[in-house]
Image (spheres, rainbow, N blue to C red):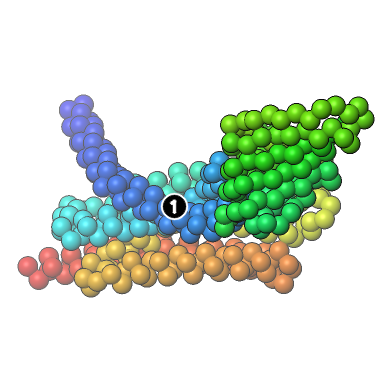
Amino acid sequence: MEEIRAKTGRKDRRVKQRAHILDRYLLTQMAPPFAIALLAMLVALLLERLLSLFDYLASAGSSLATCIALLTDLLPHYFGIALPAALCIAVFLTIRGMSDNNEIDALQAGRVSLMRISRPFMIVGLLLGAASVFLYGYIQPVARYDYRAGFYFAEHTGWAPHLQAGMFASTSSKAVMTADSVSHAGTRLKRVFIREVSPSGVAHIITAQTGALTISEKTRSTRLDLWNGEIVDDPFQATHPHKPTVTHFEHVVRVIDRPDKETAFRTRGADERELTLLELAHDLRYGLPGIEYRTLRAEMDFRMARAIAIPFIPPLAVALAISARRRKSVWGLIAVAVILIGFDQTLMFGHSLASTGRLPIWLAIWVPEAVFCIGCLAALLRRSRGSWRRRLLKRAAA
């Protein structure tokens, strides 16, 4: 009896070892396409925004650091879009490649079902779904607010005038400037002239061969760099007149139009999309002035629905990858893309309808969610039963 138990235990250990080896192999095959797809989608999504953002910030005189900071704030939003898509592409390409190499047929011949093959992918989906709760619920709301605040600061803080060559512009109530040549973005100047009056009444005449306007990140004001010029003090309007003085310089920095408290951005929470899940739960219980209950409820359910759907993406990708292999075409990948995009747009549209009260939340958000999740599992079960039937027919024919 003990010998039988020992043999059974050794057999169970061998089965578990083989299962672990299979899981490691599948995950190893999936990792490279997942990383490549995720990186490619992030680059593609950021590139389009980068061009328009950089052009706008350059015209406003903002620095490269401001542009990089804003792009960093956009990363969580685009990461939430790219993550489920990259998972789907990686699983599809992995199963499709194994099918083309007859590895799937070999595994099924060894009594390994498609459900068992899909298990490590579904576990990865569960982990990514849990991570997405943190991403959608905490990182994205804060990053959204930081992006809006940073963009507001770049647009309103300091003085970023659109100078025209030969035209005078007021940098403050007691200072004017002009330049003979101004770049298209309005940040590079040549032959600069500035006249400003100090609190004591002394007029300073500043001339420089070249200049540059940028927004200072440290002082939160506009920084004016001047090169190769001179400063002339005009004493005749001062309280205590004295002889004019001339100071030559190679490089000076002027800080103009420091922001006051009126330019400060609003606090976080005026938009429900800027609230974390804990804040949404708190406001659903105690209320939030300016935002209706249904809007808060729709926002919370929308985020949870997006995260819950991620573990169901691998079964759909596996089912359509096997189907595409049978047809030797790319229609499977196209079908996956259409289904994912259609589901995401349906969920967003339902969120809009639910937040405005035109549809109940369960109908606008959770019915499409249930249809998608059940449909993904049904597609895999149907494909798995089909593969078993084909194998049984082959055995019967033999």
Most foreground residue, 149 or 64: 64
The answer to whether any part of residue 78 appears in the image is yes
Q: Amino acid at mark 1?
A: Leu
Q: How far across and down, in percent of the image, does residue 120 sit?
A: 34, 46
The answer to whether any part of residue 214 appears in the image is no
Q: Is residue 392 left or right of residue 113?
A: left
Q: Residue furthest left?
A: 398
Most foreground residue, 393 or 191: 191
Rendered residue at 38%/62% (across/down) = 316
Quadrant of the snapshot with the N terminus: top left
Q: How far across and down, in percent of the image, does residue 319 sit?
A: 32, 63
Q: Residues within 10 Å of mark 1 (few under 14, many from 20)?
A: some
Rendered residue at 49%/50% (across/down) = 79
Quadrant of the snapshot with the C terminus: bottom left
Rendered residue at 66%/35% (across/down) = 230
Q: Is 285 located above or below residue 371 in the figure?
A: above
Most foreground residue, 56 or 303: 56
Q: How far across and down, in percent of the image, does residue 69 sit?
A: 57, 43
Q: Is residue 281 left or right of residue 322?
A: right
Rendered residue at 77%/36% (across/down) = 204
Helix or strand or loop: what does disc 1 sit on? helix
Q: Is residue 144 left or right of residue 330?
A: right
Q: How far across and down, in percent of the image, does residue 86 sit?
A: 39, 54
Q: Is 143 located above or below residue 3 in the figure?
A: below
Q: Is residue 55 left or right of residue 88?
A: right
Q: Is 292 located above or below residue 68 in the figure?
A: below
Most foreground residue, 393 or 277: 277
Name the residue tied to disc 1: 42
Q: Residue furthest right?
A: 239
Give the number of callouts: 1
